[in-house]
Image: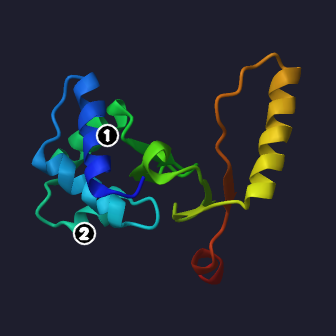
Amino acid sequence: MNNKVDVDQLIASQLQTVGQRYTNNRRRLISILLRSSKPLSINQILDMDPELAQSSAYRNLTVLEEAGSIARIVTSADHARYELAEEILEHHHHIICSPCGEILDFRLSDNIEEALESSLQEIADQLGFTLDTHRLDLIGTCTLCKDNS
């Protein structure tokens, strides 16, 4: 979903289902996340819009997450990052740096994604589990952290 109007309409609808409105600050947060090529920390979000108050940003991110408009990704080091929900961004995966919490998005080729989905479905079937979707996070150390150790 690439059209900003469609994204705004979807998010307004999602917020309405949880009894919330699509306020100016929420629009600003969504705009920042739309412009980003990767999940962002609260500090990165505030750097992109210094007029946003940190407490307001946290509150609004929580509401947007509750509505299903954004996803919060927490690494093992408790570094939270925020991104638009897959319904908006399209299906993708993450590579996460354990030391610094940096997260990058990546997509698999259709062939690899289909093979992964098939393998995961086989596992789910063996365990009597109904599979809705999957997430794949690769966890390790980025070049910057490796060079600084």
Dot in front, 2 or 1: 1
Front-lying residue, 80 or 122: 122
Q: Which amino acid does label 1 sit on?
A: Leu
Which residue, as the protein is rendered here, is positioned at the far bottom?
A: 147
Q: Quadrant of residue 51?
A: bottom left
Q: Is residue 136 left or right of residue 75?
A: right
Q: In this view, does 56 lie to the left or right of 77?
A: left
Residue 10 percent across, percent down from the top left: 31, 40
Front-lying residue, 22 or 9: 9
Residue that mark 1 sits on: 10
Label 2 crowd (10 A; few <14 / some 14-19 / many >=20)? some
Residue in the image at 14% along x and 50% along y: 25
Against 140, residue 6 (above or below) is above
Residue in the image at 80% along x and 56% along y: 111
| 2 or 1: tag closer to the N-terminus | 1
Question: Is there any visible trace of residue 97 in the rendered image?
Answer: no
Q: Quadrant of residue 124?
A: top right
Residue that mark 2 sits on: 48
At mark 2, the secondary structure is helix
Q: Is residue 75 left or right of residue 147?
A: left
